[in-house]
Image: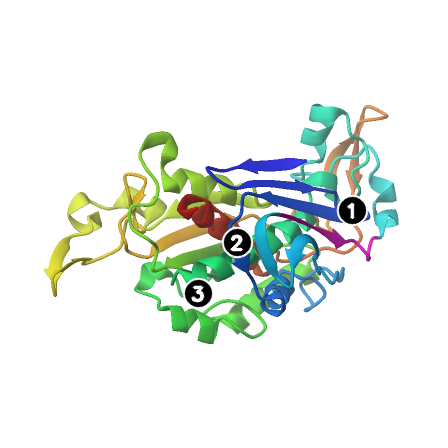
Amino acid sequence: MATFNGKKLKIEIEGTSHSEELLGKVYSFLKFKFNEDELNDFMKRRQGGQDAFSTPRKEEDRAIFSGVKNGEINGDFSFVIKNNNVKSKDYNNLYGKPRPSHADYASYLKDGTLDFSGGGRFSGRLTAPVCVIGGICKQYLKTLGIEIEAFVSQVGCVYAKSYKDGEILLHEIKEKRGGVFPSLDKKQEILDEIERARKDGDSVGGKIECIVFNPKTALGDNLFSGLEGKIASLIYSVPAVKGVEFGLGFDFCKGKGSNANDQMEYKDGKVEFLSNNSGGINGGITNGAPITIGVAIRPTPSIKKEQKTVDLIKKENTTIKIEGRHDSCIVKRAVPVIESVVAIAITDEIL
């Protein structure tokens, strides 16, 4: 069981890629009525089986709730998501043979696991219940005027529009993110990049950017209570995430204070920033500017190319080719997951 213990919220998620169902429990939520149709539409954004470069595995991902009546939560609630499209036989040839860069070998070191079918409890499949909770949090935050939206700004060597190129407005994301790929431009170039990898039996990674619009001021605190640390910790819970930055992030390394600082001025009696290089957070505390986050997503390790590994049973070197149903680019389906974990972090901080 995976557990998040926030300042107010407690979340438990249980299940594996090929278990009969996934279970989610949330404690200490507030009284709130959410829109189930809107939640189901949100869940569709992370589903597979919708294009040539995503896994053909398609699950309905409808949450069956307990402690919820007509969409209304009153404190604690739980839900299950059924796994209906499981093909464990695709992994029969991998028993005892850890897939390179998966959690297989690490899980073997942790608890002696030799059955690596579907990734078990380390699978991206477990992001489905995360999106149920995050989708509800997004709806709650929207009632406070806070909106969280993400998009893809890079796939492989193709760079699409980024918040680092200039201010991106909420309506721009909603208008341009749709269609076959959730970037704001360069859609065809991105699809071509993914297709080249797919035809070669390979995969490709990318970058997701997430913006929190109209965040409350003074959320977070210093040191261990900083909001950046809390958000980053939840983002790193998402499989395939290998880097997180706020604002300019690693680009601060090549700048100088004179052009990296966010200078201020009064405008109509209100303090405004002349830039947002810090990404809306200073000293671990929100300053009222949009929170901007960049997330690096590694190429999925499940590829059809032959790779070197070991046979933990025979204690010898071997090679494997990973068959089954896998994404050539997981980045698209990870976009709503990043929105979800950011929404959970912000919701817990507000509650």
The residue shown at (55%, 53%) is: 134
Please tell me whether mark 2 or mark 1 is closer to you in this view. 2
Q: In the visual, does 290 lie left or right of 107?
A: left
Quick one: label 2, few (<14), some, or many (20+) residues within 10 Å? few
Which quarter of the image is occupied by the N terminus?
Answer: top right
Q: Are marks 2 and 1 in contact (CB under 8 Å)?
A: no
Q: Is residue 204 visible?
A: no
Which badge, 2 or 1, comes first in the chain's sequence? Answer: 2
Q: Give me the C-alpha separation between circle 3 and circle 2.
A: 40 Å
Q: In the visual, does 315 lie left or right of 347?
A: right
Which badge, 3 or 2, comes first in the chain's sequence? Answer: 2
Residue receiving disc 2: 31
- The residues colored magenta run 77-86
Q: Name the spot of residue 166 as percent of width and height, x first.
A: 30, 64
Does the magenta run of residues contain 274? no
Q: Is residue 199 visible?
A: yes
Instruction: For mark 1, give the secondary structure.
Output: loop
Q: Give me the C-alpha separation between circle 2 and circle 1.
A: 50 Å
Please tell me whether mark 3 or mark 2 is closer to you in this view. 2
Marker disc for residue 321 = 1
Residue receiving disc 3: 160
Q: Quadrant of residue 197?
A: bottom right
Whether 232 is drawn above or below 108: the answer is: below
